[in-house]
Amino acid sequence: MIDVVKQGLILAGAIFMFLASLGLLRLPDLLTRMHATTKAATLGATLIMLAVALHFADVAIVARAFGVIIFIMMTAPVAAHVIGRAGYFVGSKLWDGTVKDELRPNYDPLTHELKSGRETEANARCEAKLTPREGDGQ
Amino acid sequence: MPTVILLSLVLMTLALCLVFARLFIGPSLPDRVVALELFSSMIVGIIGVVAIATDVPSLLDVAIVMALMAFMAAIGFARFLERGGPRDD
């Protein structure tokens, strides 16, 4: 029984890793590639580490395997965020079919300042009058 | 059990080849950094499978160190990119 579960976990992890690499190779731009790799590779490594924990069934080994899982789950999003941010700043091109880039109109790439277009005095007063604040769709 | 391990190792090696292709053709430096990160997390998986196949639990320490190094490398590359050093994509 445990053997079957183990084999299933190993196979599922390997398949998810293969899918991650396929996504990395086939998807069109940096952000979509990161979308494929970060999640699928994290899940694949997690499944394989679960199989390792089942295989050795020893407290020290299980603790170490769970340590790897927790570490990967904590660091993968941080690393992806940092790389994506750096890639956007460096100016890597987005895909032609990108529908929306909400950062572009509000962001100054030279000074790294984010603006909402409401920084003037008049806008602030107008904003204060409109309480409760209406949605930011203007 | 040996069949499953063999199959999964073959799958992951194939995946490593695909990642290496992206590492080779990747149009810009961030793409290559993403490929390197996937490379290392895939190596964590391979080390796990090899640990099961050979019954050597000490290999898990290697996996831990690998994951840690990958994180450090990603952060370092991102800092380097943002500061804007000399680049040759």
Image: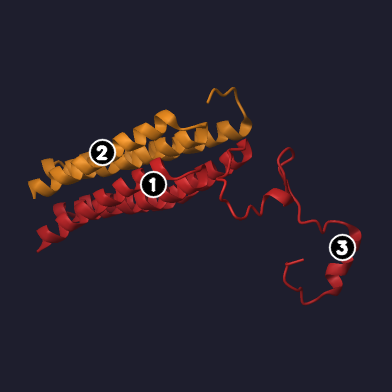
Q: Chain of mark 1?
A: A
Q: Which amino acid does the dot numbered 2 rest on?
A: Leu
Report the residue that reaches farthest toward the front.
A97
Q: Residue B12 location in percent, x, y?
A: 25, 42
Query: B30 or A82, which lies in front?
Result: B30
Q: Are marks 2 and 3 on the same chain?
A: no
Q: How is the image coloured?
A: by chain
Q: Residue at x 44, y 45 (%)?
A: A27
Q: Which amino acid does the dot numbered 1 rest on?
A: Gly
| Screen quadrant of the N terminus of chain A | bottom left
Q: Residue B41 location in percent, x, y?
A: 34, 42
Q: Crowdedness of circle 1 by 10 Å Cα count: few (<14), some, many (20+)? A: many
Q: Which amino acid does the dot numbered 3 rest on?
A: Asn
Where disc 1 sits, the SS reads: helix
Q: Residue at x 87, y 68 (%)?
A: A126
- Cα distance in 3D space between marks 2 and 3: 57 Å
Residue A56 in sight from this viewpoint: yes
Q: Residue at x 46, y 46 (%)?
A: A34
Query: A122 or A67, which lies in front?
Result: A122
Q: Identify residue for label 3.
A: A123
The first of marks 3 and 1 along the sequence is 1
Q: Which chain is orange?
A: B
Q: Identify residue for label 1.
A: A23
Q: Chain of mark 3?
A: A
Q: Identify residue for label 2.
A: B14
Q: Which chain is red?
A: A
Where disc 2 sits, the SS reads: helix
